[in-house]
Image (tube, rainbow, N blue to C red):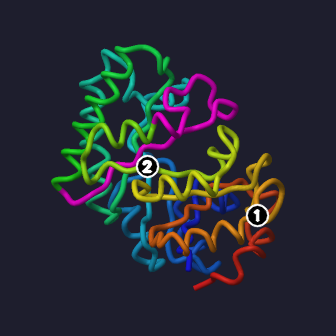
Amino acid sequence: MPRFAANLTMMFSEWAFLDRFAAASEAGFAAVEFLFPYEHAPEEVARRLSDAKLEQALFNMPPGDWAKGERGIAALPGREAEFRASVDTALRYADATGVKRLHMMAGLADPRDPAAVATYLANARHAAERLGAKGLDLVLEPINGRNMPGYFLNDFGMAAGFVRAMGLPNVKLQFDIYHCQIIHGDVTMRLRALMPITGHVQIASVPSRHEPDGEELNHPFLFEELDRLGYDGFVGCEYIPRAGTLEGLGWFAPWRR
């Protein structure tokens, strides 16, 4: 049975961020994820998790200057020192929250640029070694170019190639079904092929990125497929509610805790 994690960056936006933990728990979620926790002290995030009896499924390492349009720095030559400092920051929050996997955002760069590729792989190895020492996984997520034009890691085959080339047991794929459908289609066959290297799954409807209850994809079938494939990780609900968050949770009713 899938274990769903509410994405608190996109869901429960009717509440202030730190109040979303309790709201997610009351709605029946046992776990949460979000993009970034860095505007709040790690101890406060940990307290909200504990008070709400939630598990932290995932969050991203610092992305550079998000407000100025940066979407990660891992593939940006010349930013290596900043990247290493960002790993230190993320690990402080990982220690506080007990999260077991962190996502490394690549940034806006040309995937055909050898310098960008070399920088990305070197930074990924550094992050994986630091995370591995604490028993954590590093996950790499392809993101579609419609939502994030110019993003370096924009292809599932490329991401899988990086995971396999590094050959590190704690480097895995973040399989966002929404992004896969937009980039490639044929989601089920890609799930079957890439499940051995998948460490986290995310969902949203296509093309709207709303609740996973219709449009192009048959989500009940995909949830059953995850069970058939033996996936026992979290399924992150990284979607934007059509209206209110609570009003859109009809799809989630069978899996409420």
Residue drawn 81% across the image and 53% down it:
216
Residue drawn 53% across the image and 69% down it:
21
Disc 1 from disc 2: Cα separation: 22 Å
Quarter where residue 251 is shown: bottom right
Reply yes or no: does residue 149 show up in magenta.
yes
Residue drawn 47% across the image and 21% down it:
111
Among the two numbered marks 1 and 2 on one chain, the one whose residue lies closer to the N terminus: 2
Residue 219 point in image, percent of width and height: 72, 65
Tell me: residue 112, above or below residue 164: above
> Mark number for residue 218?
1
Residue 224 point in image, percent of width and height: 63, 74
Give the structural element (helix, strand or loop) at label 1. loop
Tell me: residue 155, above or below residue 135: above
Reply yes or no: does residue 200 show up in magenta.
no
Q: Residues within 10 Å of mark 1 (few under 14, many from 20)?
A: few
| Amino acid at dot 2 | Leu
| Amino acid at dot 1 | Asn
Per the rendered image, the range of residues in magenta is: 134-158
